[in-house]
Image (cartoon, rainbow, N blue to C red):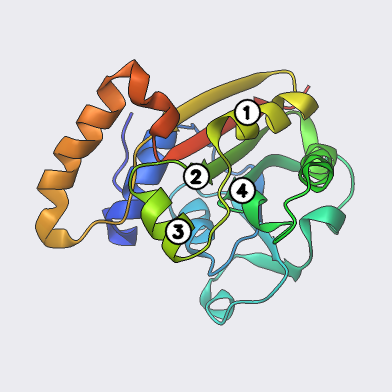
Amino acid sequence: MKQNFQKYGQYKNDIFNKLGFNFKKGKKILDVGCGDGSDAQIFINEYKLNTYGIDIYKHQNIKDIGGLKFKKASIFKIPYGDSTFDYVFLHDVLHHIDEPKQRREKHINGLHELRRVCKKGGFIIVVEANRYNLLFYPHMTLMKGHEHFKQSYFRKIILDVFNNVQFKTFEAHLYPVRFIKIFKVYEKIMEKFPLLKPFLAYNSTIIKND
């Protein structure tokens, strides 16, 4: 069932509704690479989760997010014990953890650390931009230098670490307000045709930690 997150912006509303995961109130979540805390705000205010965040730097907005328990830390050494969290969440983080080298072993090591801190039967949710998306590639890859993963690589490293995996792809972008209706038509076209799935904006996975 869709929820209304429009007060956090059109982009966040689209991401969380298209991800479609049913977070349960009161559970403990770790937002890895939480950045400015905008996703953490949704976890706290809308899903009523017990919310923790880590990042390698502390964004200036973090101090204003009531209820967020933040620690400065890396994905490679998460400062919590085994099986601590019901949910572990990453949004556009994996492709940053070993820049500029992008070594597969580092990506795998990061995923194993997520597995360690997630409870058995808990869920790891990963959302990653797709390198060859029709809008991301010219803007984010060529112009801004983001080394997003291609879909096949994203799926391979996830399956190298986890067994109980569900993949989902979808189109979502931050659009100029005046052109939203036009871009929503574009989204529907992209998501409708199977041949376009390798080029959708986001690769995501919901992993049940066995």
Q: Distance of mark 1 from mark 2, alpha carbons?
A: 13 Å
Task: Name the residue at 12% across, 55% down.
Answer: 179
Rendered view: 100 above or below 61? above
- Mark 4 and mark 2 lie on one chain; the one further toward the N terminus is 4
Residue at 80% x, 39% y: name it. Answer: 108
Q: Which residue is mark 3?
A: 142
How far from the left and from the top, in percent, is residue 199? 40, 33
Q: CA distance from mark 4 to mark 2?
A: 17 Å
186 relative to 171 in the view: left or right: left
Question: Could you tell me which residue is drawn at 82 percent across and 43 percent down?
Answer: 117
* Picture disc at residue 155: 1
Q: Which amino acid, by three-letter code, is at mark 2?
A: Arg
Q: Are marks 2 and 3 in contact (CB under 8 Å)?
A: no
**SS assignment at label 2:** loop
First of labels 1, 2 by sequence position: 2
Residue, disc 4: 90
Q: Which mark is residue 131?
A: 2
Q: Is residue 13 left or right of residue 108?
A: left
Where is 17 relative to 106, above or below? above
